[in-house]
Image (cartoon, rainbow, N blue to C red):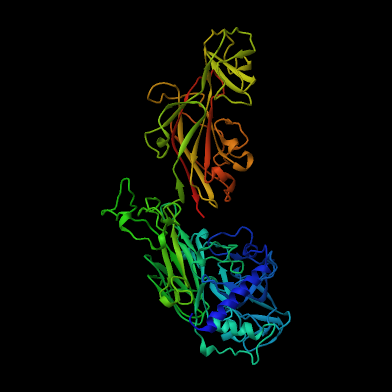
Amino acid sequence: MSSPRIRALLRLGVVAAVAAAAGLAGTTSASAIPAGAPKVGMVCEPGTASAGTRTFNLVANAGYISTPDGNAVYVWSYANADAPDNGHFQEPGPVLCVNQGENVVVNLRNTLPEATSIVFPGQEGAVAASGGSAGLLTTEAAVGNGTVTYRFTAGSPGTYLYESGTDVSKQVEMGLEGALVVRPTGHADYAYDASTRFDPSREYLLLLSDIDPDLHHAVELAYGATPPSPPPGYDVNSLRNRYFSINGREFPDTIQDNGSSLLPNQPYGALVRIQPNSSSNQLPSLIRMINVGALNHPFHPHGNHTRQIAQDGRPLRTPTGGDASTEHFGETIGAGQTQDFLLRWDDTDNFNPANNPYPVAPPNYLNVTFKDNSTWYSGSPYLGYKGTLPTGVTTQNICGEWYFPLHSHALNEFTNYDQGFGGMGTLLRVDPAGGCSAPVASAALVGGTLKSGSVSALSAADTAYYQINPKTTTRTSATNATQTSITVASASGFPTSGTYYVRVDNEVMAVTGGQGTTTWTVGRGQLGTTAATHSSGAAVSALATDWYAGFTGIPAGAQSLKVTYTGKNCATTTGTTCTALTTNVPQQTVRICDWTIAGATGCTAVAGPGAAGWVTLPAPPAQPQGVGSSDVSSTWNLPVNAAQYIGTGSSKGQVRVLVHTQRWTASSPTPFSTWGNLMKIVYDAP
């Protein structure tokens, strides 16, 4: 960037970007994203469907995109006029998703200073147009809010592009393009047919484009408020691309989420995020690729192979109809081409430090250099594990996931205005199988006493247990068979509200009043027992246990939280073995802290198990569950948005899960012990 003209261009671009941002205060690209769209992955614009017809309303308009080096580039593009942002400028255009055989209607309104249009390459049937005026390739919408309507029947399933059919060498370079996805009828999980089935939650679009900021600036000046005289010319023969984009962004902006407020005019991220395939996760991911630029791009997934299944919306087949898909370590995507790839990631070796370590020792972190003291490395070479990094090194790693570059192998394209690394690149992120997980960091007794074990026993489903007995106290005076008020030495660890049951000798009493104090109102002879006399000092035992496990370091923005608990209950409160419970098994309810209900004070040992902050985990499985003397393992899936279950402020990153177990049913329940074997949470990290 040595020439005065380029430096001036950059300054003008920055000023324009600031002005554009000032005019859009409070607006983010999230409003261009359909409701419920994923943070990562392809974002479909569904349009409006009615009686076999799907309609899209697009507006061609102008705006600015931001580049990672601080520049802003003037761009033309299509926007969704029906989005909550009312057609706010975006680059690239929305992803139009339709079903095979549907009648597709695209209404275009033009706010650009030139006539424009849309063509739909690859559609088998004719594209009819109404309104507008005839152009060289198709019907055009005139300057000044001119309109045109295009109609066609969605043909073969596949990945297609749509783009301007007017002054193509100029308007496509300016950004008038987008993706059209045709899905097979009735099969949103097929790219084409059953042989191309994929995981619908792992569908990605990488739309490649390139930008010559000089040519864009020439158009900006020509249509500015005070264009120079003579106006600058647009000479495509002088094309020299300086920015190379994926989904309208350049690396590292490509790895930001869809709808990031940092990029209000560029709503689509390009991070490819997967998990290892397994016996329960056999479906591959699907990567749809489109090259809308004027150059061919050799694209390469570092350390991985993809299987190309189609090109230009046609599956790869032999002359006799057999499978002609091919495995690739890299593939050149020609200008105007589309290609589809399936990506499996099989952890064949499943190395782990506990029982399957690498055959050679990994290098000591002191012998590794971290450029700029920043890294994507977790500190451990094992997937799903974090290790030690030198003091002062910042890691972007969340839970031991792996990252691979996914980029153009024409290295001049892996730059932002010749400065690397940037440009046409993104990352392939491989999360641990099942998602990120967190070990139990602490455990606290809410109602009970520790019989044996430590919090470390909850880290794996093995022979080690975290064992809890019910809370006990003593009578401070003798009791006759008719008293309905008794005093106890201590109420600590007993519920502070609600009716609950205790056992004194062979009698079960219901505590109905005085909870939280040492003077209780009680119902006598409960649950199949008989009221009796009791001496001073008689033991009083709760018939329930309550404890919670604490997790730390859960990142804000984590989603799809899953809680797994494995445990059992045993008939006695003494001894080192689990005595079998054969009848009247305790009932277990697992709850999670909702920090938005009562804050930190609502989810503590002091607050008790009945505090409002503890909310029961939703079915399935339904709760309470009867849990006897054999381990029962259950997993609960929480709603996608997990924000209320992750602490903030002084409780930042904390998740708390409480296990309440009660034996409050006839006949004559006796105290028991709760044995926790495994407690873990799994989540999708941001």
Residue at coordinates 65% horizontally, 71% vertically from top-left?
20
Residue 346 falls in image quadrant: bottom left
Front residue of 672 and 310? 672
In the displayed structure, 13 sits above or below 542; it is: below
In the displayed structure, 675 sits above or below 67; it is: above
Residue 261 seen in render: yes
Q: Position of residue 194 (x, y in %)?
A: 48, 64
* Residue lying farthest to the bottom in this orientation: 230
Q: Where is residue 531 in the image (x, y as percent from the top left)?
A: 59, 10
Q: Where is residue 39 in the image (x, y as percent from the top left)?
A: 56, 59
Residue at coordinates 37% horizontally, 50% vertically from top-left?
387
Q: Position of residue 75 (x, y in %)?
A: 60, 77
* Residue lying farthest to the left in this orientation: 360
Residue 647 seen in render: no
Front residue of 321 and 561? 561
Left or right? Give the position of 219 relative to 323. Answer: right
Front residue of 82 and 6? 6
Front residue of 288 and 294? 294
